[in-house]
Image (cartoon, rainbow, N blue to C red):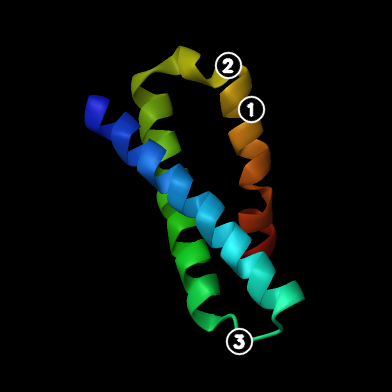
C-alpha cells in the first residue's frame, strides 16, 4: 500500500508539470505539443489506475479535501480523452 501512495505522489507531481508544460506549449510558445501531450495523457491514465487501486484497498481515502481537488485536476485529462 505504501508503494502505491509513493507512486501516486510522484505521478501527481509529473501530472502537474506535464499540464503546465502542455499549457505553455499551446498558449505561450505556440509550438508542437506532441511529446507534452503524450506525457500528459499517459500520466493521466497512470493516475486513474493508481487512484482506483488505492480506492479498492482503502475506502475512506476519497473523503479528504485533497482527493476531491485532485479529481478536479484530472478533469482536463478526461476532456482530452
Residue 20 in view (yes/no): yes
CB contact under 8 Å: marks 1 and 2:
yes
Q: Residue at x 64, y 86 (%)?
A: 31
Which mark is first along the chain, 3 or 1? Answer: 3
Q: Position of residue 30 (x, y in %)?
A: 71, 84
User: Nearer the viewer's eye, disc 2 or disc 3?
Assistant: 3
Q: Is residue 18 left or right of residue 25?
A: left
Circle 1 residue: 68
Residue toward you, 45 or 34:
34
Q: Position of residue 3 (x, y in %)?
A: 23, 32
Residue 66, relative to residue 40: is it above or below?
above
Residue 53, relative to residue 2: is it above or below?
below
Q: State the separation of the CA atoms marked 1 and 2.
A: 7 Å
Count residues near mark 3 (Cα–Cα under 10 Å), then give few for <14, some for 14-19, many for 20+.
Answer: few
Circle 3 residue: 32
CB contact under 8 Å: marks 2 and 3:
no
Residue 66, relative to residue 4: is it above or below?
above
Q: Quadrant of the N terminus?
A: top left
Q: Residue at x 59, y 80 (%)?
A: 33
Q: Position of residue 43 (x, y in %)?
A: 44, 57
Q: Quadrant of residue 79?
A: bottom right
Q: Residue at x 74, y 75 (%)?
A: 28
Amino acid at each position: 500500500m505504501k508503494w502505491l501512495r509513493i507512486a501516486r505522489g510522484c505521478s501527481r507531481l509529473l501530472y502537474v508539470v506535464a499540464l503546465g508544460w502542455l499549457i505553455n506549449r499551446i498558449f505561450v510558445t505556440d509550438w508542437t505539443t506532441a511529446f507534452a501531450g503524450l506525457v500528459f495523457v499517459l500520466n493521466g491514465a497512470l493516475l486513474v489506475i493508481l487512484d482506483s487501486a488505492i480506492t479498492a484497498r482503502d475506502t475512506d481515502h476519497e473523503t479528504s479535501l485533497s482527493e476531491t481537488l485532485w479529481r478536479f485536476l484530472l478533469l482536463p485529462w478526461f476532456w482530452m480523452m
